[in-house]
Amino acid sequence: MSEKSGNTVEDTKYQPKLLLHTKMRCPICGYENASMEIYEHEIPVIDRINIVVFKCEKCGFRIRDTLPYYVPGKRTIIRIFIERPEDLNTLIYRSPSALVKIEDLGIELEPVGEGGEDSITTIEGLIAAIAEMLEFYCEEENLDPEAQSECIKKLAMLKEILSLRRTTTVLIDDPEGLSAVLKTYREDNYIIEVGR
């Protein structure tokens, strides 16, 4: 603690520390310059948490949430279990350095890399985007019949996941440790591993 003028004391030990400030697309209105900030905050007894603040100046959409402590620069693996309708509404932040996997289908979405676009989306939106890319790939003219058949099978399985006729686990592997679950509607639908 440090003293200010007079008898007023300012608490400097427990002030949030800004870890990340970035501009990104609003998931509601599509505005490209919405703001997202992630803070580290020390709290007595609990130790540390991260605070995520997202706001769109255009439509007014806001998210303020606390998350388990993430360490930027330490690899973070998030496993999101898709078993119930509310699991598809899980809201995530995927940093440009994050690899996305649906291991039981053998699907990987590579990191977009430095300078790439961050994204805030639901798991349903992420899976739908993967399905859209896969559908485009399945229609390529020079694709051999075996690869096309495999592609069509994976696309059908993605659609089964979206309609909840199939369960799966979506894995987000972020070597920078910035990706996060922003909102979930079921407590036990994800786990986080840090620093593996």
Image (cartoon, helix red, strand yellow):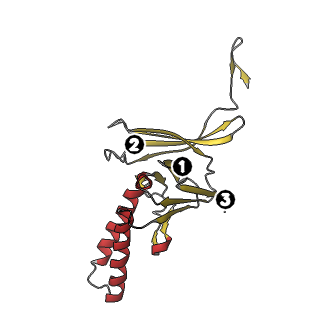
Distance from label 2 to label 3 (Cα)? Answer: 30 Å
| Residue type highlighted by circle 1 | Glu
In the rendered image, residue 138, in percent from the top left (x then y), is placed at 31, 77
Label 2 vs 3, first from the N-terminus: 2
Which residue in the protein does label 1 denote?
A: 187
Which residue in the protein does label 2 denote?
A: 34
| Residue type highlighted by circle 2 | Ala
Which residue in the protein does label 3 denote?
A: 195
Q: Where is 120 relative to 63, above or below?
A: below
Q: Where is 133 relative to 22, above or below?
A: below
Q: Where is 63 relative to 173, above or below?
A: above
Label 1 vs 2, first from the N-terminus: 2
In the rendered image, residue 45, in percent from the top left (x then y), is placed at 72, 36
In the rendered image, residue 139, in percent from the top left (x then y), is placed at 27, 77
Label 3 SS = loop
| Residue 18, quarter of the rendered image | top right
Residue 177 is labelled as none
Distance from label 1 to label 3 (Cα)? Answer: 22 Å
Distance from label 1 to label 2 (Cα)? Answer: 28 Å
Which quadrant is home to the C terminus?
bottom right
Label 1 vs 3, first from the N-terminus: 1
Q: Residue at x 47, y 43 (%)?
A: 36
Q: Residue at x 42, y 52 (%)?
A: 86
- Mark in front: 2 vs 3: 3
Viewer-proximal residue among 160 and 13: 160
